[in-house]
Image (spheres, rainbow, N blue to C red):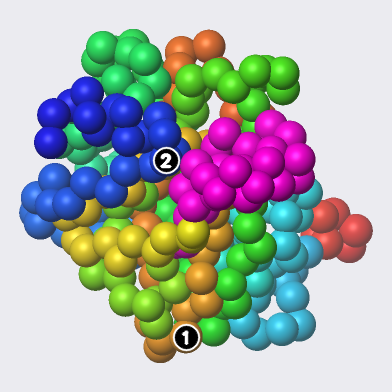
Amino acid sequence: MSSSCVQERFSADGYVWEKQVVPACVIESWKDFTTVVVEQIFAALHKRRDVLESDKTDIMKVGIKHGFREIVMRSPGRYEITLKESSKFLQISNMPSLQELQSFLPFVPAFLNATSWDDVQICHVSLVLALPGSKEQSWHADGGHVDLQHHQPCHCLNIFIPLLDLTSDLGPTELRPGTHLHTRNLVPLMLAAKARKTLQAPTTPLLQCGDVLVFDYRILHRGLANVSQQNRPILVLTVAQAWFKDVLNFPARSLKDHNRSESKE
């Protein structure tokens, strides 16, 4: 399929699923790296008594205000770890090359009305980790619109790169195609689309290693329940136009900040 057709599909549906674009060796390097980060960042969390929960399945509370620059719990059992910030905190220096990864994704900048990776910014490099037993999320968009009166082209997007082959048991990501057009005024626009019979049914891509899922920050989506016995790790690149600054998804405070419980002793 031509690049113009892919761009048209992205503009209309709010996402594209491209199969077998990232080599296995690149996936393995990110998998090895993130395995170390996950182990060490959770060990660091366990040392902070102020974030420990009584429920053994979770060690933090849900939401930005309870999270850190390095890690946030998006919903029970579902964590997002910022890999650059975590690497700095943990003093891990062997993060795989982003430039190499970008070389296998030359089509992405065009979704942001840019000609090359030099014209866009990577806001976040993160790992979304759904633990066994994590429930399905509520429908949500990762960000809002820059113009609430008129729909504007995509200014920010996510690239999901699975680090293992996804199955329905692992809790893949479900999308509502086309809803990036509706979330600036969700209820009336969704009702209008339903009346016109243009409202698309949800879709759940079962990504395999090497696949990528690229979706508009404004599209409705959710992680489904992980009913398996293993973690579900997804590498995520959040990419945006050069002017954009994401101030909503991660807090300013760091795990390096003083432990609040210790400060009271």
Residue tagged by mark 1? 227
Looking at the image, how many numbered discs can be counted on the residues?
Answer: 2
Image quadrant of residue 117?
top left
Res 20 seen here: yes
Q: Would residue 181 be counted in the magenta stretch? A: yes
Of 164 and 100, nearer the camera is: 164
Numbered range of the magenta stretch = 173-200
Image quadrant of residue 96?
top left
Name the residue rendered at 50%, 42% in the picture.
Answer: 178
Q: Nearer the viewer, mark 2 or mark 1?
A: 2
Of 198 and 209, nearer the camera is: 198
- Label 2 and label 1: CA atoms lie apart by 28 Å
Please indicate whether residue 108 sits to the left or right of residue 113 in the image: left
Q: Compared with residue 166, is residue 21 higher up or lower down, i.e. above or below? A: above
Q: Would residue 207 be counted in the magenta stretch? A: no
Whole-percent x, y for residue 75 in the image: 65, 65
Quadrant where the image shows the N terminus: top left
Q: Earlier in the sequence, mark 2 or mark 1?
A: 2
Please indicate whether residue 224 sits to the left or right of residue 214 in the image: right
Q: Amino acid at mark 1?
A: Val
Name the residue rendered at 56%, 66% in the picture.
Answer: 78
Whole-percent x, y for residue 133 in the image: 54, 84
Q: Which mark is residue 13?
A: 2
Are the residues tagged 2 and 1 within 8 Å (C-beta)?
no
